Image: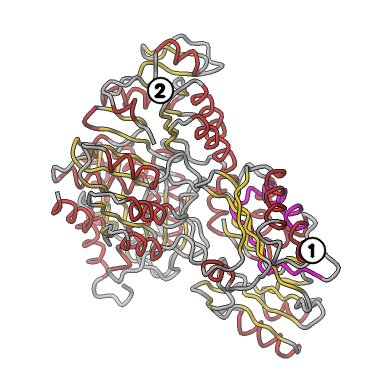
Amino acid sequence: MFLLEHDAKTLLSRGGIRIPDGILIESTSALDDAVLPAGPWVVKAQIPAGGRGKAGGVRVVDEESGLRAAVRDLLGARISAHPVGAVQVERRIENAAEAYLSLMVDPTEAGIRVLLSAEGGTEIEASARCGGSLATAVAAPDAVAITDAARRLVDGDLSDDVSHTTRAALISACELLTPIFLSLEALLLEINPLFALADGAWIAGDAKLVVDDNAFGRNRLLDDILDRRGDAYPSARFKRENGFDYVELDPDGSIGLLTTGAGLSMMLIDELRAQGLRPLNFLDIRTGELRGDPARLIEVLARFAAAPALRVVLVNIFAGITHLGEFARLLLDALEATPKLRAPIVARLVGNDLEEAREVLAPIGDRIHIEPDLGRALDAVAGHLDGGDNR
Amino acid sequence: MNLGTIMREGAPVIVQGLTGRQGRRHAGLMRAFGTNVVGGVSPNVDRESVDGLPVFPDCAAAVAATGAVASVVMVRPESTAEAVIEAVSAGIDVIVSVAEGMRTLDSLRALREVRRAGAVWIGPSTPGMAIPGNRLKLGFLPNASLLPGPVGIMSRSGTLSYEVGYRLAARGIGQSVWIGVGGDPVKGTRFAELAPFFHQDDATRALIVIGEIGGNEEEEFAATIEADGFGKPVFAIVAGGGAPEGVTMGHAGALVHGPHGAVETKRMAFEAAGVTVCPTIEALVDTVEASI
């Protein structure tokens, strides 16, 4: 899961890392009552995406009037296709050297990769590709090995580039951030810029943190994020509460996808969009885990029923191991439990017991169209949308 | 990457977690397909056999008694790392682990042990692998999609590969070797590591790569065949172009952030390496059929 900057910094701060004075603002009215840090400020859109600065999601302001305008401007805007639900207002750090630090799980080298540079900034990765001074090494996934590797980089590859204060800041940052990285079960932690102050102290100017989705439900620190800030991570919260994946893609989508398998569900979304259609959601319901209980199906159908622009449901089940007859019975139960959903259904069913599934679903009549061929099923979906303006 | 011992027909296979619900069921299905399952491992279970298969307390005992060269690990994700490490320590050559939800730090630990021993680990979070011509299935790839033939398949997604395999099989085109590498960010075997194997495998005349957003396996594979050459046609699809940045899409490894893991980056890498990237499943199946 990709954490918003504000949450990443909260976690770092709890781990003893110094961050700029700042506050999360979720509405323009909240700004009136907020105890703001001293200016000048930087205002940053809280979206789960990199490259915010280039996309217009970061504003530098000196006056309070400018601050208000920037907050008003960013809240509710879309930056890099993400709606901005909150901004972080921070005191701008001045008169500090900027460095770069990144720790990441390296799946190829089977270890933790450390990347360090004596310079920070948005161009650091591009500059490194052009021969800039980004030093890197891979260490075993334990704190001693990682900090040792970092120290060797600072005093080796980077020794000609770093000032005395930047050297101290980078070494201190590695020592403090490595145990946090490991305990948060992070896949990536990038501090850019890392402000190195004249007295050898340092401040995490930004924080990009991606944590292991597989650790949710088993890591207290990660679960605490979803407990407190679940509204900002609806998909991750849904997964933890329900045990399967549902991601709303387009609130005005017209096609509800009742699908199993992450890869196939993503591919269906791509193919529908390529035809100019608008799927509402991504879903991996995991038919193998249903075990005779329609609860997951009911949960999903309730979301379809509440979607304002929904016109048709596309079911796609490839029953390699599971049985279509059993799935059809669960679908029937779930439809009966969701009377508000009246949209027609195109069910692309392939695999064991197709005929039994047809018999089970016969009482639904013309509302459901069962079609074993995926191409023809997609045509049927498009057919239900013809004549409407919400393709 | 040495799949040598399991390429022989009748290679002996054990199932770790044989006495569990999933282990017992899939051991039966693997045997029905033709896999030579010779026993199982279940610590803390006081049973001598399940469905006629001997149950051993640990891998070492199972290997000593049966000569098994491969193991299918069907235990909970929390126990998978220990099970994989146990199999490696017992001298198993090829380990397939199916569980979804292994913690990445556990996967890293297991991977380091596997590499130290020079073994092959396929998984986690995978339906496994199959060599249909040898009646070998390690895991639970669906029979409806399996058919002996000339096409190699490697995939990060189970269901998307089932769909591709199924549609090709319907046109009479089967697989030489099918390997699901799994959907997690850290895994035992990556696309690039399989390139030399598929390059050398005489039964493979063309290769299908089924990728998705997140990570850099596709780019890494493309760089490998660009540098080393491959000499056989390679076809690919990459799922997830419609996925929002910063949101995990089902598979723990399917996450785009910034330029990292985006479909476009993967497509460009593939095309630079001479891989034919297809926009839809239908286009992939048509293109492969036309080339075979």
Horizontal side of A352 relative to B129 (left or right) equals left
Query: In the picture, residue B108 is in which quadrant?
Result: top right
- Secondary element at tag 2: helix
The amino acid marked with disc number 1 is Arg
Disc 1 secondary structure class: loop
Q: Can you see residue A390?
A: yes
Residue at the (55%, 78%) spot, across then down: A54
Disc 2 residue crowd, few under 14, some 14–19, many 20+, Cα 10 Å: some
Residue at 44% across, 25% down:
B21
Q: Which residue is mark 2?
A: B24
CA gap, disc 2 to disc 1? 53 Å
Up the image or down, A24 lies above or below B76; here it is below
| Circle 1 Cα neighbour tier, 10 Å, few/some/many (<14 / 14–19 / ≥20) | some
Q: How many marks?
A: 2
Q: x, y (%) of residue B142?
A: 29, 36
In this view of the protein, which residue sits in the foreground, A226 or A340?
A: A226
Using the image as rendered, state which of residue A368 and residue A136 is in the foreground. Answer: A136
Which residue is situated farthest in the right direction here?
A199
Label 2 resides on the chain identified as B
- Asked if residue A363 shows in the view, the reply is no
| Residue drawn at the location 41% of the way across and 53% of the way down | B220
x%, y% of residue B241? 38, 63
The residue stretch that appears in magenta: A172-197
Residue A197, percent across and down?
A: 81, 70
Name the chain letter of the residue that bears numbered label 1: A
Q: Where residue A18 is drawn, which disc sits there?
A: 1
Classify residue A117 by image quadrant. bottom right
What is the x, y in percent for residue A379? 21, 62
